[in-house]
Amino acid sequence: KYAHERASHSPDEFKVQERSEFLKFLEAEERETLLEIGCGPGWDAQFFQSQGLRVLAVDNTPTMVNLTAEKGIAAQVLDCYDLDQINERFDAVYTMNCLLHIPKQDFDRILLLISRRLNDNGLMYIGIWGDQNFEGIWEQDGYEPKRFFSFWKVEALLEVLQRSFKLEYYRRLEPHEGRIFNSLIVRKRMEV
């Protein structure tokens, strides 16, 4: 319902800056492939592809996937619960405002699925709102019907992430008064 509306707006400047920070990591390590989970209308996938990365973008909304594909990006309809349907492994994973819709009880499972799509020592960017403990339908959501959100206290989020990943970068932003945005880059721990 909101896909075309979202596609008509450019990404927030603070998100563009954090995306560029992730690109610096990728360039420094000569990374070549990237999986974007929750690609939305494809703005970020288009950026990474324009920087020379080979990108696969996935989203569970067919309209978003179509908007992304129209930009010349390999895109497919896929829910993050089904990441094991992708046979390829990637140097990097990028997810902006996607994982905040995953129930906390499923978060470890999703991180494992993501980890399996990453090459050893691969990097993942996570952009995620919140520094509060909340899970459920968020009444302040601007969408109708209201969507499910899972917000984490940052300490709890870091604890869960660091079970499978090593923290490389963390930045806490407050782009809108009273709303915290967490920008993280984590590295897949080597498989034993």
Image: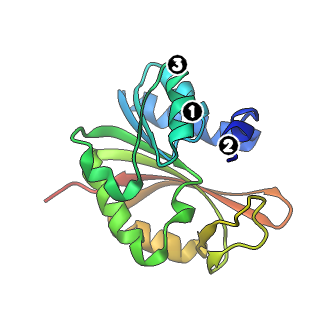
Label 1 sits on what residue type? Gly
Query: Which of the numbered marks, if any, corresponds to residue 65?
Result: none
Q: Residue at x 25, y 52 (%)?
A: 84
The percent coordinates of residue 21 (x first, y second) are 58, 38
* Separation of marks 1 and 3 at Cα, in angstroms: 12 Å
Camera sees residue 73: yes
Q: Which mark is residue 15?
A: 2
Tag 3 near tag 2, CB within 8 Å = no
Nearer the observer, 189 or 144:
144
Q: Earlier in the sequence, mark 3 or mark 2?
A: 2
Q: Is residue 176 left or right of residue 2?
A: right
Decide if residue 51 is in sight here.
no
Extreme residue toward the left, this view: 192
Q: Secondary structure at mark 2?
A: helix
According to the image, label 1 marks what residue? 42
Query: Is 30 placed left or right of 42 in the picture?
Result: left
Q: Is residue 47 left or right of residue 138?
A: left
Q: Secondary structure at mark 3?
A: helix
Which tag is nearer the camera, tag 2 or tag 1? 1
Name the residue that disc number 3 marks: 50
In-image side of 2 versus 192 (left or right): right
In x, y percent, where is residue 118? 29, 46
Question: Residue at the location (30% across, 54% down)?
Answer: 115
At x 83%, y 67%, the residue is 178
Please identify the quarter of the rendering in which residue 106 is found: bottom left
